[in-house]
Image: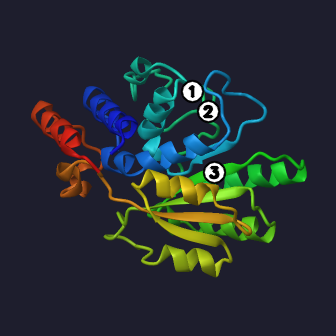
């Protein structure tokens, strides 16, 4: 685990403990994907509204705490501000608000909607002949929503080769309607799909930068709670829990012991 990703997970864990909020396992599953996207896309932390920036949309909005901690790591704001996460009148809500938080492009939370907004932005860039790109991170459980596939249909129909869909394949929806072969599903919609290990930062970056014919989809095979056996072994129990002092110390030690 690279130091920056380890630190982001430690920030997620610390803030979840102090706030009593946070979807810790799902936040842990997307850290490398978030880091890889921002390492590749055009953006400026000192100028979040820069007109030449690429756009990132977190469609699985309940992973907002991971996004906040990533943005803080990149210098968009100080991490101390994020410790107000979930508090009354805080800018840092449990789902992100684009008006309140620098670097947040779309307010998400209603699952299945962020990808449609991302496709619309990508279409607007196409119409304007802009070189800007759009990246959207979608969850596996979220993909039970028909609006996800309706957005994919439109994106493919309009030839949006400036749109990259990052699919967080952490298989956390196994007790619901799990999509067992997302690669086949997206290829069935005529997307250009590649599957990568979702915690392998070089592999993620290579996939993001790879030229694509049409809508690009990166199916990132991730582990919900990655970095902490405590979370991995009982992920459903941690869906909305924050750790007590003893649990927090155990998970922090687990993160320090994780070397890959």
Callout 1 touching callout 2 (CB < 8 Å): yes
CA–CA distance in space, label 1 to label 2: 6 Å
**From this viewpoint, which residue is outermost toward the left?**
246
Give the foreground label among 1 and 3: 3
* Image quadrant assignment for residue 255: top left
- Front residue (pair 105, 256): 256
The one nearer the camera, 72 or 239, is 72
Q: CA distance from mark 2 to mark 3?
A: 16 Å
Q: Is residue 127 visible?
A: yes
Callout 2: SS: loop
| Residue that lies at the very extreme toward the right in this rendered image | 128
Residue 216 place in picture, x, y as percent: 65, 64
Q: Is residue 175 left or right of residue 206?
A: left
Q: Is residue 4 left or right of residue 230?
A: right
Residue appearing at x 31%, y 49% in the figure: 25
The residue under label 3 is 135
The circle on residue 202 is none
Quadrant occupied by the N terminus: top left
Spatial CA distance of label 1 from label 3 is: 18 Å
Residue on which the image places disc 2: 98
Above or below for 22 versus 112: above
């Amino acid at each position: 685990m690279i130091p920056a990703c380890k630190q982001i997970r430690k920030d997620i864990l610390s803030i979840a403990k102090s706030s009593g909020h946070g979807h810790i396992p799902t936040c842990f599953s997307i850290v490398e994907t978030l880091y890889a996207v921002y390492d590749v896309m055009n953006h400026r932390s000192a100028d979040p509204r820069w007109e030449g920036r690429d756009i990132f949309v977190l469609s699985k909005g309940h992973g907002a705490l991971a996004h906040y901690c990533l943005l803080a790591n990149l210098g968009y704001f100080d991490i101390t501000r994020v410790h107000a996460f979930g508090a009354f009148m805080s800018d840092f809500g449990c789902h992100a608000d684009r008006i309140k938080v620098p670097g947040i492009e779309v307010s998400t939370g209603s699952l299945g909607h962020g990808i449609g907004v991302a496709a619309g932005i990508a279409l607007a860039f196409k119409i304007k002949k802009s070189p800007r790109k759009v990246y959207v991170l979608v969850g596996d459980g979220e993909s039970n929503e028909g609006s996800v596939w309706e957005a994919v249909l439109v994106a493919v129909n309009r030839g949006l080769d400036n749109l990259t869909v990052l699919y967080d394949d952490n298989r956390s929806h196994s007790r619901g309607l799990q999509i067992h072969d997302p690669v086949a599903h997206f290829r069935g919609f005529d997307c250009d799909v590649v599957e990568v290990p979702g915690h392998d930062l070089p592999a993620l970056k290579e996939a993001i930068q790879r030229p694509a014919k049409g809508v690009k989809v990166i199916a990132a095979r991730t582990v919900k709670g990655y970095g902490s056996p405590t979370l991995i072994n009982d992920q459903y129990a941690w869906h909305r829990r924050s750790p007590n002092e003893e649990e927090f110390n155990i998970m922090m030690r687990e993160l320090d012991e994780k070397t890959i």
